[in-house]
Amino acid sequence: MLSLFDFSLRINGYPITKAKAELKAIQAFSETEKEVFIETKKKEIVAFHLQNNSFYQELVGSKVIQNWEDLPVLNKTDLQRPLAERLSKGYFLSNVYINKTSGSSGAPFIFAKDKYSHALTWASNVLRFGWHGIDFNTSYQARFYGIPKEFMAQKKEQIKDFFLHRYRLPIFDLSDFVLEHYLNYFKSKKFNYINGYTSSIVLFAKFLEKRNLILKEICPSLKVCMVTSEMLFEKDKILLEKQFGIPVVNEYGASELDLIAFDNPQGEWQVNAETLFVEIVDENNQPVPNGTEGRIVITSLFNKAHPFIRYDIGDIGVLDEKSTLSKPILKKLIGRTNDVAMLPSGKKSPGLTFYYITKTIIEDDGNVKEFVIKQTDLDAFQIKYSSEKELDPEQIEKIEKAIALYLEPDLKFTFIRKDHLKRNKRGKLKQFTSSLQCK
């Protein structure tokens, strides 16, 4: 019998049954077969885009490619041009999956996946969540995420939540008053797992700690907690496991790609080597030995609609010395942290709230290249951005309305256009920082 989850993907044109079957076949490969598969897929995806994608042809140029390392590294700024200019032959805005990146690196853009590639992403999610006893068809999720406040976008997310057995706990206001309500949901609903932004879930755990409560005792059906989108520090993992009374699983992914790394049942941060090829490279874009720190560069092995080949995701990492081509293990990830915004009303809003606000900045024309937001006072924020042309009053008004909607009214924002934004010593932008001390 076809499940509700599978059915919802199929009616939207995503061949999930075929994707699950292919992923299962890849999983069954021997070490040698897996290595041959990866090398074959790398050559196939490059050949496809060199033949069918003018954007990628332009990026590679006339350079003679003899080795994999000769291919250019694709940066996020390369992708800040209209999506239609980046699609391969035979793919159009009407027959691909389209979404926007979170902009957590400060460089947002719109991307596309062909429908089979996106189905593989879901199959990958099913596989890895299944490692921890979670079934998307039956397991009930407490979801610490944002949600769009525009009517149609919100309804779309609510429909997805229904098909995916999720109950959403919006993270725009995480004051104690709101968290008390969320605690009541855990008393009345039989949640099987928690999933969401790391900083938001950590705030909930601190709330429980102040009340000397263990969540598993309040909601006995809970099995596991998956955190995503931001760094999970060891001290926070210890706090979560103590206050929740369940294992905590660390997820590292990117919407434009797939799940990149996921805690396996052995406690290793296993890298996705089924739909992705992950490299750690130096400043010259050359692979470094396992155990050495470098930039994380990723190739999507199946996405024919849009090239993500040697794509610099903007993070720094280290592969474990025991990694193999067929089973890489991520030893360390550096980056992806955000501060928490404290507001005059007493609300606490995690930095990732600005993902929903900055969707209003991200337009397909690629005008805004990068942006960072800094809280300078309880009611005052500064937005620095680089762009081809200055934001006009209409665009600024649109952003300010989104700020009032997702945070609260009467906040003061200063917009500063820069030619270039200052990066940290690792070359990264932190999307949101606060000068205030969050307690």
Image (cartoon, rainbow, N blue to C red):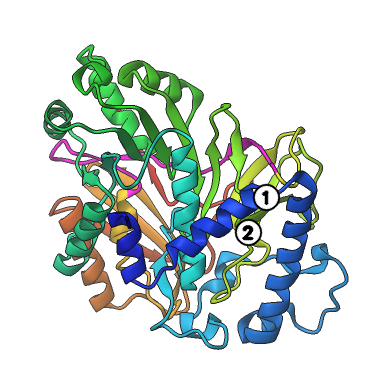
Compared across the picture, whether 367 is left or right of 381 comes to right
Q: CA distance from mark 1 to mark 2?
A: 7 Å
Instruction: Tell me the amino acid under the disc marked 1.
Output: Arg
* Earlier sequence position, callout 1 versus callout 2: 1
Which numbered marker is on residue 295?
A: 1
Q: Is residue 343 above or below residue 19?
A: above
Q: Residue 196: image x %, image y %?
A: 34, 41
Kindly tell me whether residue 403 is visible in this rendering.
no
Asked if residue 345 lies in the magenta stretch, the reply is yes
Label 1: how many Cα within 10 Å (few below 14, some 14–19, many 20+) = many
Amino acid carrying mark 2 in the image:
Asp
Question: Are the residues tagged 1 and 2 within 8 Å (C-beta)?
Answer: yes
Looking at the image, is 264 positioned above or below residue 427?
A: above
Is 243 in the magenta?
no
> Left of 60 or right of it: where is 254?
left
25 with respect to 84 (left or right): right
Q: Secondary structure at mark 1?
A: strand
**Image quarter (top left, top right, bottom left or bottom right) of the C terminus:** top left
Expressed as whole percent of the image width and height from the top left, the position of residue 74 reads 65, 67
**Nearer the observer, 360 or 289:** 289
In the image, farthest residue toward the front: 1
- Horizontally, residue 153 falls left or right of residue 6, namely left
Q: Position of residue 56 (x, y in %)?
A: 65, 79
The region drawn magenta spans: 327-352
Q: Quadrant of the N terminus?
A: bottom left
Residue at 22% across, 66% down: 153
Marker disc for residue 312 = 2
Residue at image position (18%, 38%) is: 347
Image location of residue 247, percent across then percent down: 42, 24
